[in-house]
Amino acid sequence: MLNKKLLVAAIIFFISSAVHSQVFPTKPVKIIVPYGPGGISDIAARMIGSKLSEIWKQPVIVENKVGGGGAIGTGFVSRSDPDGYTLLVATVAEFTIAQHLNKQINLNSLRDFTPISLLTDTPMLIVANMNAPFNNLRQLAEFSKQSPAGVSFATPGVGTLNHLTGERLAAEMGIKLVHIPYKGGAQASLAVVSGETPLGISGAAVVMSHVDSGKLKILAVASQSQIKGHPDWPTAIDAGLPDFVASNWVALAAPRGTPQKIILKIQADVSAILQMDDVREKLIKAGSEPIGSSPEILTERINKDSIRYSKVIEITNLKAD
């Protein structure tokens, strides 16, 4: 009788081991985007999800869970099983800004998630209406001295990376900028195009078509060096603002506790996809730099930007709506 029990136990153990040793994934994988369709996080998710489906021979479903400035989708993934089958496309906003801006948010990026890889990097652009009486940051500073009420700038909303970049620009240049929040990047960029506001802080993907058609002009780009394909766009660093770097990176993360083997497999496959010529071409055309990184590099980026933006929030005394 004992031998029979041992035999049954051995069979169960063997079957269980065989199941767990199967190559991930063995069923559909879901990628959650906490914003609506059309943005750079959604574009990156769908492009990478399509390629992962081909590699893994399993459906990779991209789902938009919108609301709460990214908090709804982010919270959903944090509560999901840590098995690699529910992933999050995260951005700098919810992973490094939200927890400092709104203390009521019970989410912490490195406590609740395991970083996988940086996907893309999109530097912030400081843009202006074509008829604005300034063509660079130095001229903006001079114009602001003649405008006691300040110079208004448009962004997609309070507490966004765009907003913090504008507040930081004002503080470091010693000028007065007045924030005008809009409901999304498209509305904010159109406000600058129409002249409703003379200045805007935007991601390249949102304003590229307006710049190409001559409806907006670039004052500076908040990156370490010139953007590929646009050597004529000066950086804020060139204008005398040391380390003025602000970019809306997009990354892939999993719920905390996801096995390391699964994390490393996803990271390796995603990094390979981001080296594919067709993927790189489409992302660069959308105004983003394809990256691909180790979990350690993403963790370092989260820590660095979290410190940077918590200081901006503290200095400017920003509060969430």
Image (spheres, rainbow, N blue to C red):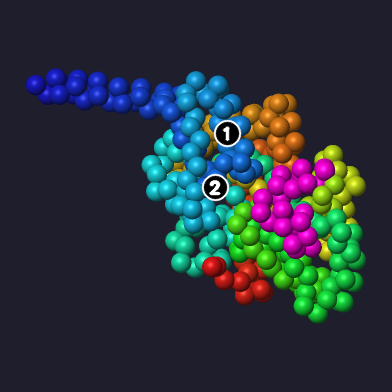
Looking at the picture, how far across and down is residue 154, in whole percent? 71, 61
Q: Looking at this rendering, what residue extends furthest in the left direction?
A: 1
Please give the residue where the numbered disc 2 appears in the rendered image.
Answer: 35
**Of the residues shown, which amino acid type is indicated by label 1?**
Arg
Q: Residue at x 47, y 62 (%)?
A: 105
Q: Tell which of 210 and 70 is nearer to you.
A: 210
Is the C-beta separation of discs 2 and 1 under 8 Å? Answer: no
Q: Tell which of 31 and 8 is nearer to you.
A: 31
Q: Residue at x 55, y 61 (%)?
A: 98
Work out whether 3 lies above or below 196.
Answer: above
Looking at the picture, how far across and down is residue 251, in whole percent? 60, 44
Magenta-drawn stretch, dominant element (helix, strand or loop): helix
Looking at the picture, how far across and down is residue 60, in whole percent? 49, 29
Q: Residue at x 69, y 39 (%)?
A: 291
Q: Residue at x 60, y 57 (%)?
A: 183
Q: From the image, which quarter does the N terminus lie in? A: top left
Query: Few, some or many C-alpha atoms within 10 Å of disc 2 (few <14, some 14-19, many ≥20)?
Result: many
Answer with mark 2 or mark 1, whichever residue precedes in sequence: 2
**Of the residues shown, which amino acid type is indicated by label 2?**
Tyr
Q: Which residues are magenta?
A: 186-213
Count numbered badges in the picture: 2
Q: Is residue 304 visible?
A: no
Which disc is residue 46 wearing? 1
Q: Secondary structure at mark 2?
A: loop
Locate residue 11: give its quadrant: top left
Residue 279 belongs to magenta span: no
Work out whether 210 lies above or below 94.
Answer: above
Q: Secondary structure at mark 1?
A: helix
